[in-house]
Amino acid sequence: MERTINEVFRNRADKYKDRLAIEKKLGGTWEQATWTQYYERARATGLALVALGLEKGDRVALLSENRLEWLYTDMGVLGVGGCVVPIYATLTDEEVEYVVTNSGSRFMVVENDEQLQKALYSLKQNPGIVKIVVMDEADAKNKPPVVISFKELMKIGYEKQNEDPGLFEKIADAVDLEDLASIVYTSGTTGDPKGAMITHKNIMAVVKSLDSVEPKYAFDTDQTVPFLPLSHVFEKIAGHYYGMYVGITASYAESLDTILQDIQEKQPTEILAVPRVLEKVYQRIISQVQEQSPFAQRLFFWAQRVGARRSEYREKKKKPSLWLTIKYRIAFLMVFKKLQQALGGRVRWMTASGAPTAREIILFFNSAGIMVVEGYGMTECCAPATMSNLSDYRIGTVGRPIPGVDIKIADDGEILIKGDNVFKGYWKMSEETKNTFTADGYLMSGDIGVFDEYGFLMITDRKKDLIITSGGKNVAPQKIENLFKSDPLFTQVIVIGDNRKYLSALVNINIEQAEQIARDKHIPYKDPQELLDNEAFLKIVDDHVRKRNENLARYETIKKIRIVKHEFSKESGELTATLKVKRRVVQEMYSDMIENMYNEESDTVHAV
């Protein structure tokens, strides 16, 4: 019986030895490590930190994009009883310093010179940092003595291993289930970031639970191409640790820009993704279809309808008619096979967790033979608390609780969670920890939901995001936003309306789709961005808004919108690392625009 992820790591390395375990594309080349190499390099990393003074329970801040060195550090630190503090590479100097100081990290492992400068800034505020390790060797040269390269660190570790063989395994075996494995900081959009304390017990509860589900999600013959950041609890636990537990090969994509190319090259069998990725793929396909001949368009939308009908039969566990089966085979060969090939041709399923996904988008992927697995969770319960079963699911729900997790709905609709996957509490925040749990020990999620008649959980909204209009109507914004994003013209939609007479929205426009519309409607332009100020185009945007409003109750309709010209992004602060919108941040950033929208008499669309 494997107690900790340390034991899992050692056993998988012993079992798979020279088989490829992990690889990462850098500069167009795949850097690889077998299971034996993975273990030996992680062991060297951990032992080197011990040689430099790391003691059990010490925190090690890890500031990097996905790299093999990230994985070596993570498993090395856990193996010597340390606690990993992952930090998003996109954070500012001040944000990094807060996490490092708050966590009391004594060591920092950073990717390159850009991240090193953030670490040196933290060092000024936190002289307790013992060493800063830089993955890119060249960026560690001619720096203060506190800075060493990852190559130097590994050398120290291999020497320590030669001096004291078996030390790493001895320390790893002494790690207890209740020991901290990681402190993962929440986004802090409503205040200072909070460090969620995750134990080995939490990690093992999740990976064992996922592995116990039938039919199996994964096998040791599977391959993934991860692209979500390892700093996020979803990729870290449901991807990295669960993948290790099963024995999956992980080929880390070079960047978000190369995802499709890397997927086509490595041909994964499963993909961990978030709804925004599925939305982008779907919107791009729709845009391409609209540029094709009328016959090709009719064929595509016919295939989409056929595929949706077949997917609905599968969802209801009913056998489709022979005629529908024949039509689907034609539709698959003519349309859906291309999508499957674009994703490497072997993908069985991909996730859409973290936010609602439009039903028509899920049906589209399902029609291509790619099961979309919806799920629900949060940092405080180590990612998944519920998951769709591959053979028993309801689109629009997030599945049933995974084995070992107990979920109930409070009187006000809030989702309450209990299980060994639930975190230990917030680091150095006893009052906040106390306020996060009910008197009987359930984690208060802050999300509103309901179980359907079959026991599937449906998320209706964030408790704090629920809009209450001045007329007293309760409105779930995500439902409306999801409806609008199923129109390829809109890439992002944020509904506004709390304590207002009516609802409005801030939107991003899909520029490629805008160009296509302009060509079809003979609207002249030189630069596509000009369309966002063009009255003829804005009238068309108004028409799209009206069409979506037809599917909503009167109090849910969007009365006004404003177009934000630049695309929301992580870099500009509107999106999280997993591409979810920071609703409150957006509303603060564009507060003047929102106020002007409500102060104006007209219902016209304006771009700003």
Image: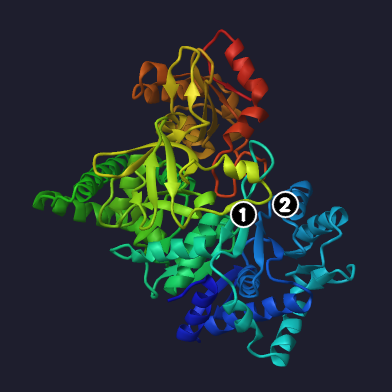
Q: Residue 283's x, y, as percent?
A: 43, 42
Image label count: 2
Label 2's element?
helix
Q: Residue 397's x, y, as percent?
A: 34, 43
Extreme residue in the front direction: 439
Label 1's element?
strand
Nearer the observer, 351 or 95: 95
Name the quadrant of the C terminus. top right
Q: Are there few (<14), some (14-19), or many (20+) residues within 10 Å of tag 1?
A: many
Q: Is residue 519 left or right of residue 305?
A: right
Q: Amino acid at mark 1?
A: Val
Is residue 236 something one can see in this rendering? yes
Per the rendering, the mark at residue 457 is none
Which residue position is annotated with label 1?
184
Is there a contact, CB below 8 Å, between mark 2 and mark 1?
no
Q: Is residue 18 above or below residue 405?
A: below
Q: Is residue 549 above or below residue 179?
A: above
Name the quadrant of the N terminus. bottom left
Q: Amino acid at mark 2?
A: Val
Residue beneath the point at 46% across and 58% down: 420
Q: Is residue 147 above or below residue 527?
A: below
Residue beneath the point at 57% across and 79% down: 173
Q: Is residue 529 left or right of residue 396?
A: right
The quarter of the picture where residue 65 lies is: bottom right
Is residue 281 something one can see in this rendering? no
Q: Is residue 469 left or right of residue 392?
A: right
Which residue position is annotated with label 2?
99
Residue beneath the point at 44% across and 24% down: 475
